[in-house]
Image: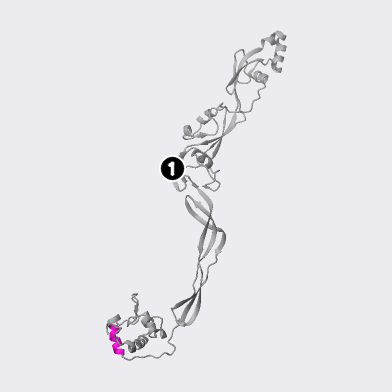
Amino acid sequence: MNKAITATALAAALLTGGTATATGLYKDVELSIDGHTERVSAFALTVSDVLAARGVTLGVKDVVTPALDSTVSDGTVVDVKYNKPVTLNVDGTPMTIETTASTLSTVLAGTAVHDLDAAWVSVDPASPLPRAGLSVTVSTPKQVALKIAGKRVEVTTTASTVADLLAEQNLSLSATDVIKPMLTTAVAAGQQITLDRVVVKTSTKTEAVKFTTVQKRNTSLWKGETRVLTAGRSGKAKRTYNITIVNGEVTRKVVVAETVVRKPVTQVVQVGTKTSSNGVGINMARAGMWDRIARCESGGNWHINTGNGYYGGLQFNRASWNANGGRDFAAYPHQASRAEQITVANRYYAKAGTSPWTCA
């Protein structure tokens, strides 16, 4: 116990009666500081003397009961409540409260924070308030949308940040996963948090390499005709891909290395440019007969191509057309004029009469 004699009490004792009187000023009092009570013995006339004996320094807003100039006697209870600043950060909104309460729970009970009973508090509400004050984060329950790997769920959470929410839901992140918004973002009611599961891997495979085609003009071939001079051949290449998979679906595939195993062979094709008969004579003999046959064979449509292997008004097949010099005029019968088709028909007629035509 502190038996120190304060300057005020000792001076008063000496003035009023010497040592015997001073001894009578020795008091036993109860001193309670922010709820912590102890028995104090000291030479004291007033509450101020008791506090001085214990080295208690008061701030302007601290509260003492009884008043500092009140006289004390044995058994007097002196109650000191320090004024303390408490900063509450409620769902991202800070507020500062000055209080003489001894515990955080008392401060929280006096606020208008909704759903306080279900809220997350960064400091145990039963904790005593230090004289220097306290900073406390409070996160009330909020409903948010959590979209994980493309699947959306609604959750109620008291997490204060996105990182806290993931921890609350037992969700971990790989080095390649993507979270939006960022982990340090404060959680707000109605917010959507998206977690995309991202996998990046490499794959190596041997694949065909398409050959290219080069065209060369040929004036002896009819326009629309082609002839392959060099057949193309696909090559082979060993390719390594960097593949990005988001929520189970490939979103990006990039070649990062390639080794040619077999070079492709370029295909060379001659393309016909001939569009006229170059002075080949026209033979219109028996034109009336050929018109009648054409009406029976093709309905008189000299440029018909039915896709059945027979062409033009007289329905030549390709072999008969070529065998009788049809290529003097066109690659296919239906590409030639009526007069040119009749000319080729007269050539065929000279060999076989009308027997090739069922409509003769």
Q: Position of residue 130 (x, y in %)?
A: 60, 28
Main SS class of the magenta portion in the image:
helix
Q: Position of residue 336 (x, y in %)?
A: 38, 83
Judge from the rendering whether residue 188 lies leftward or rightward of residue 359; answer left or right.
Answer: right
- Residue under the image location 48 percent in, 54 percent down: 250
Q: Residue at x 69, y 10 (%)?
A: 23
- Give the camera-side residue of 53 and 357: 357
Q: Amino acid at mark 1?
A: Glu
Question: Which of the 4 image quarters holds residue 343?
Answer: bottom left
Residue 336 in the figure: left or right of residue 163? left
Q: Is 277 colored magenta in this rendering?
A: no
Extent of the magenta region: 287-295
User: Is residue 304 or residue 230 the one in the foreground?
Assistant: 230
Q: Is residue 290 above or below residue 262?
A: below
Who is closer to the viewer here, 77 or 119? Answer: 119
Which residue has dot 1 on it?
A: 154
Q: Position of residue 290 (x, y in %)?
A: 30, 87
Does 291 appear in magenta? yes
Between 119 and 208, the residue placed more toward the observer is: 208
Instruction: Determine whether the residue tagged by mark 1 lies in a helix, strand or loop.
Output: strand
Could you classify mark 1 by the number of other residues whose Cα lies within 10 Å: few (under 14), some (14-19), or many (20 or more)?
Answer: few
